[in-house]
Amino acid sequence: MDNRSSILQVQNIVKRFGDVTVLDHLNLSVDRGEFVTLLGASGCGKTTLLRIIAGLETPDEGTVLLSGQDVTDWAPNKRNVNTVFQNYALFPHMNVEANVGYGLRLKKMARPQIQKTVSEALALVQLPGYEKRHPQELSGGQRQRVAIARAIVNSPDVLLLDEPLGALDLQLRRQMQIELKRLQKQLGITFIYITHDQEEAINMSDRIAVMYGGTFAQTGTPAQIYDEPINDYVATFVGNSNIIRGVAEAADGSYIKASLPGGTLLARKGAVQAAAGADVLIAVRSENIDLLPPEEAGLPAEVREVAFGGGMQRITLLLQDNSEIVASRHGIDSGLQAGDRVSVYWDKDKAIAVQKA
Amino acid sequence: MKKRFLKKPGAGIAAVPLWMFTLVFVAGPMVYMLILSFLTRDPSWGVVNEFTLDNYAKILNPVYAGTYLSSLKLALSTTAITLVIGYPFGYFMARLSEKWKKRLMMLVVVPFWTNALVRMYGWIIIFRSNGLLDKLLMGLGVTDAPLRLLYTYPAVLVGMVYALLPFMILSVYSSVEKMDWSLVEAARDLGASKARAFWTVTAKLTLPGVLSGVILTFIPSMGLFFIADVLGGGKFMLVGNLIRDQLFSARDWPFAAALAVILTLLTTLFLWLYRKITHVRDLEGIL
Amino acid sequence: MKKKASVFPKIYLGVILALTYVPIIIVIIYSFNASKSATAWGGWSLDWYAKLFRNADLFDALKNSVVLALMSSLAAGVIGTAGAVGMARCKSRLAGAVEYVSTLPIMIPEIILGMVFMAFFTLLGLKFGMLTLFLGHTSFCIPYVYMIVKARLVGLDKSLPEAARDLGASGFRAFWDVTLPLIMPGILSGMLLAFAMSLDDVVISIFVTGARTVTLPVKIYTQIKTGITPEINALCTLMLLATFVLVTLSGILGKKRNS
């Protein structure tokens, strides 16, 4: 396990709150300078994992290694790791300068040096000259920048960010995503970033770890996560895919032939090694579903509902096994309406077999 | 894989002085009171370490039981009057604008922080025979002879209500203040009359405040012996007066302890009931 | 809102408030009464204030009361604050019980507290005087500080001290730099309340006071009982003034607390 370039290693972490196991034997290795996102719905344990890395929580089992050193039992102040808290946690009784310089004061840095470093950090987050302001006088976005400056000024080995953009409006969010990414590249600091927003995760990360029920459902690059989900949770959470149940008929090279409700279609094999006769789940995103006239080959379906929203037409379909799937069309009027019969079809490269999470 | 069971002692240590003080100077005296209540009084001086239940039996003696009952009666009257006056006050106050809320709060708190004896002294001047009230009433022609209100039951009652009213007001205020008014509006919207909306929604939601106010007036009114002293002229005995007299005059400490134990149990019972009914741990509006 | 509905509450609030101030205002007016008779009005005068300032006994009592209130509110400030901070970390049943017992002094009627202290201090063989007064007053001052500070701690964003730890502060340093300044208004207003309560206390003081060390409320109590001298009016007026200053002070602190 001793990887020279890995700056953070989390090994077999278990955390229980009472009878509930929040983290169940987690393993993660993060390289120096990497931008890793922990993606998951609320309650999946991502914040707990972050707090364990920061030292604000102690795991029940397992170890945390920073630069190869076991820091599991180290107090948070002994670790060269800093956190940007979800609600920013700026000290309300200190001005911006005192907030940002707090870590440096603890390191007993000389006063003029602190002033210089603080103003550099504020320039970096594009808040030059804000030293004497109080947190109460700042907007949400500005507080966010101060919180980031306060953390990076200590040049941590790893910067932990707990849904840092969660409280900002959509436009500011997009802007901050770009800035954060630029900052990370510029400083070369390792980021561990928490979000429940899949788009944010895909835009920013080098690597994404999708968390589900206290475990990693899948870890990989944004492309891998998006295009090659290994289980139904990742496929639905990240790709908003439809999941269709079926039985494997035969495997043909990198494709699998699946018997689905009312017909047989091909899909990529992905990570699934399904023998003939085994149950399979096929994931296919709504925009990849083709709707053909009923007489063509495919899965017979009935249109349930046609809704228009966000420049997209969402067509809810009922398959023969009474499961619902959603197909979407950009802009154009599909000419379909409730009660119409269609045949559901997809290109074999656009669907993938996934495991049950 | 190693497991971690041990927790560091940490900041919990800061509570040690509190624990020590509580143990020695609160729990200690209370336990001693309990023990004392089962000991025998020495005919000449002090107590003898002999177990007895006589002190509790003595409470049933009509003289003392009577005092307990009349003290309870006064406490109940005080509480009822305080509630009738205090509820509308707290309710109306909570409906004022923020600015006026703050001002009124200040005005309510000043007498509250004023020495209770000083305030009672004002009532003495008012109630005294040929005092201010008599002069006012005779001047208006309402009465033609002094009422001699001082050292009467109504005088004591006024003093008690006056001393305890702020507790009721603050309790009611704090529960009305944090009530969600949209619930009342919803009730009105669903067709409830004003009165019905008040009874079905407001009254229920402010119940913790009312109960807290009731406890905060009822419990002290059993023990405020100095009000009975200065406004009642020693003619009216509260449990408080009884305990004090047993300590200072009769020198029957075990009996005083027994009286105090009963009063403590009564208090605990009320607090327990409060928590049972409202599921709120701390009394509303106490601070 | 209809106009009619909004008038009655204002009248009600005004009348009740006015009534609560009647006895206080009367005391103030009578302190300037030239007549020796406590009931008759004999014109304006400052005689009673002059007399009051020559009354060494009363001033001794006042001094005792102030010293006592200062000491017990200070002790309560330290013990109560530390207790609230420490108890925030203990979640055991025992801690709950300790909390119940430690707040008992402001829950049970004062008379009981006075009586148990008198009995207990006699048992310990303590000399009745400043020490017993101090112990007695501290016991009921602690709950005020404890409860206000605890409420303040509960309302404190937990991530603030955590952020300090995260930035490299030791547990104590995080408390000192972040938690303490943020709960300070609570500590001060708790101590102020404790100070006022101690200065005001008659019931408990009567039981634990010594023959030599008399507090002001005890002195006033005996004077009212034995015979009224208008000096008391003057003294009460001065105490009202002091109270007003204290309340204003705590109001200013309260404002700080809200911001």
Image (cartoon, coloured by chain):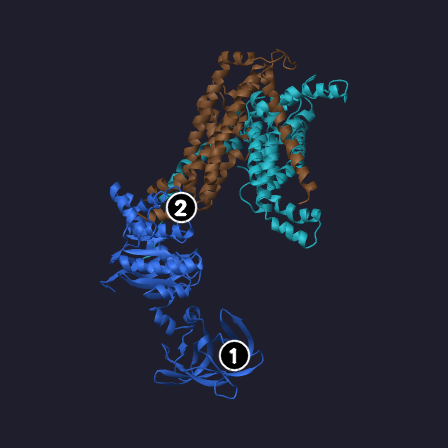
Chain colours: A blue, B cyan, C brown
Task: Tell me what residue is drawn at x 37 percent, y 78 percent.
Answer: A272
Relative to C12, does residue C130 appear above or below in the rendering? above
Label 1 lies in what chain? A
Task: Residue B145 in the image: state x and y as whole percent.
Answer: 76, 17
Q: Nearer the viewer, residue C31 or B10?
A: C31
Q: Which mark is residue C7?
A: none
Disc 1 crowd, CA 10 A, few/some/many (<14, 14-19, 20+): some
Choose the circle earlier in sequence order: 2 or 1.
2
Q: Residue furthest left?
A: A4
Quarter of the C terminus of chain A within the rendering:
bottom left
Task: Residue C69 in the image: state x and y as whole percent.
Answer: 46, 26
Task: Tell me what residue is drawn at x 24 percent, y 64 percent.
Answer: A3
Q: Which mark is residue A135?
A: 2
From the viewer's perspective, is A55 left or right of B109? left
Q: Which mark is residue A334?
A: 1
Q: Answer yes or no: do the residues labelled 2 and 1 have beta carbons within 8 Å?
A: no
Could you tell me if residue B177 is visible in this image?
yes
Check chain identity for marks 2 and 1: say if they share one.
yes
The amino acid type of the residue labelled 1 equals: Ser
Task: Tell me what residue is drawn at x 64 percent, y 23 percent.
Answer: B123
User: Spatial distance from mark 2 to mark 1, Cα to Cα?
Assistant: 52 Å
The amino acid type of the residue labelled 2 equals: Pro
Helix, strand or loop status at disc 1: loop
User: In which image quadrant can residue A190 be found?
Assistant: bottom left
From the viewer's perspective, is B260 left or right of A195? right
Q: Nearer the viewer, residue B235 or A210?
A: A210
Task: Residue C192 in the image: state x and y as whole percent.
Answer: 47, 31
